[in-house]
Amino acid sequence: MCKSPLHQLLVDLPKCEHHMHLEGSLSPELLFELAAKNNVTLPQDDPAFASVEALYERYERFTSLDDVGNPRRLPPLSPVIPLYSLLGYQADAS
């Protein structure tokens, strides 16, 4: 246990994400919205991208990074859609 007099202050401070990949923070709704707005074709050979609901179903079966690319656990998602192609305008990134 931390014995520093600052311990409780550090515990009480608000916390934030220190490292987050932007593409991993997009909701399925926003991903589909930005793709439509910026004329980006989502992977057609991956059933996870058939609809917002299908992508949520795929995310619900994800339990850990061990799931990625392990066909016994989950089929891998299509290669990452280049995020820059979804973000066509500065307003898309805010």
Image: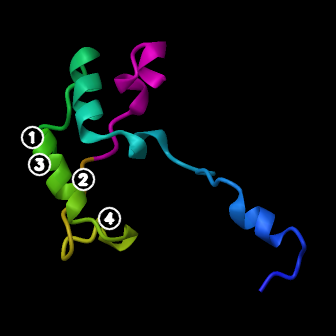
Residue bearing the label numbered 4: 68
Indicate which label's residue lies in the foreground, 2 or 3: 3
Q: Quadrant of the N terminus?
A: bottom right
**Residue, x 81% and y 81% (percent of image)?**
2
**Residue, x 21% and y 61% (percent of image)?**
60
Residue 46 visible somewhere in the drawing: no
Q: CA distance from mark 4 to mark 2?
A: 8 Å
**Is 52 one of the magenta-colored residues?**
no
**Residue, x 47% and y 24% (percent of image)?**
93
- Indicate which disc residue 54 carries: 3
Per the image, label 1 sits on a secondary structure element best described as: loop
Local packing at callout 4 (Cα closer than 10 Å; few below 14, some 14-19, many 20+) is some
Q: Are marks 3 and 1 in contact (CB under 8 Å)?
A: yes
Local packing at callout 3 (Cα closer than 10 Å; few below 14, some 14-19, many 20+) is some
Residue bearing the label numbered 1: 50
Magenta range: 79-94
Q: Earlier in the sequence, mark 1 or mark 4?
A: 1
Q: The residue under label 3 is which amino acid type?
A: Ala
Q: The residue under label 4 is which amino acid type?
A: Val
Q: Are marks 4 and 2 in contact (CB under 8 Å)?
A: yes
**Residue, x 78% and y 69% (percent of image)?**
8
Indicate which label's residue lies in the foreground, 1 or 4: 1
Residue 40, given in percent of the width and then of the height, sits at: 25, 23
Residue 7, given in percent of the width and then of the height, sits at: 81, 71
Q: The residue under label 2 is which amino acid type?
A: Leu
Q: The residue under label 1 is which amino acid type?
A: Ala
Residue 26, given in percent of the width and then of the height, sits at: 36, 39
Residue 38, given in percent of the width and then of the height, sits at: 29, 16
Indicate which label's residue lies in the foreground, 2 or 1: 1
Residue bearing the label numbered 2: 77
**Is 87 one of the magenta-colored residues?**
yes
